[in-house]
Image (cartoon, rainbow, N blue to C red):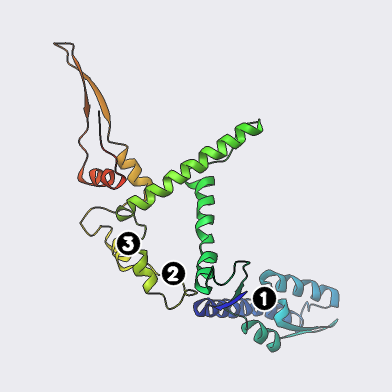
Amino acid sequence: MLVCRNGALAEERTRKREALLQATERELEPICQATQRAKRRLTGQAKIALRVGKALNRFKMGKHFRCDITDTAFHYARNPHSSTAEAALDGLYIVRTSVPRDLLSTADTVRAYKSLATVERAFRSLKTVDLHVRPIGHRLAERVRAHVFLCMLAYYVEWHMRQALAPLLFDDDDKAAGEAQRASVVAPAQRSPRAQRKAQTKRTDDGKPVHSFQTLLDDLATVTKNRVRFVQSNAETTLLTTPTPLQQRALDLLQVPLRL
């Protein structure tokens, strides 16, 4: 079992908790004033508690406030002990594994845990972005399994294509340089200088336009094989469109030769 601390995550949680506390106070203050106004004063412990409960549930900050409700008054204050106890855990998380330490080091355990984000992106790509595995219009179990298998196989091919085409995509193709910039394995991932240049200039280092995976496939789809028939001789031949420099570079990266 590993206990890790992420400084950036701790700062973000502290900031977010303070923002939610202030938002809750903005909800509670009008209720407090309503119990003190001269006309149409809010009275009744049940009525006051109902409004207070709605305000506390809106931002889920009830545990951080002390509320005193009577038939004629309402007072609130922050609970410093609750906030302090929660703040002590900011940025901490525990990773537990059954793999022995000699097979999986502390750093590798954290990397393996963080790599779950890749699995989540794969499921999102399968279901909505690229492959659209849903809806499945099959009724027989074996056909459903075959459908899912083909979608998984398609994602496997897509993954390898993305790795090969990374120099032409907005994807980071120099992850080692980005990894070197991280203060520790629990720190947020960093994009390499090359990836940042691609994002800023929309150009690769050799001057080619940077694409997303989908737009690059759309560009490659314009490479076509045409069957040509000559009117006078009635002879036929097959011609391939000439790839642009970008298309040729993509084909080279994929190791796909154009053949008739």
Residue at 76% x, 72% y is 53
Of the residues shown, which amino acid type is indicated by label 3? Ala
Comes first in the chain, label 3 or label 1: 1
Provide residue 16's location: percent of width, then percent of height.
57, 76
Can residue 44 be seen from the camera position used here?
Answer: no
Real-space Cα separation, disc 3 to disc 1, in angstroms = 42 Å
Secondary structure type for disc 1: helix
Residue at 43% x, 44% y is 157
Secondary structure type for disc 2: loop
Dividing the picture into quadrants, the one containing residue 93 is: bottom right
Provide residue 201's location: percent of width, then percent of height.
26, 61
- Mark 3, Cα crowd under 10 Å, few <14 / some 14-19 / many 20+, is some
Circle nearer the viewer, 1 or 2: 2
Comes first in the chain, label 1 or label 2: 1
Circle nearer the viewer, 3 or 2: 2
Comes first in the chain, label 3 or label 2: 2
Of the residues shown, which amino acid type is indicated by label 1? Glu
Q: In this rendering, would 183 be left or right of 199? A: right
> Which residue is disc 1 drawn over?
27
> Which residue is disc 3 drawn over?
199
> Which residue is disc 2 drawn over?
189
Q: In this rendering, would 95 be left or right of 166? A: right
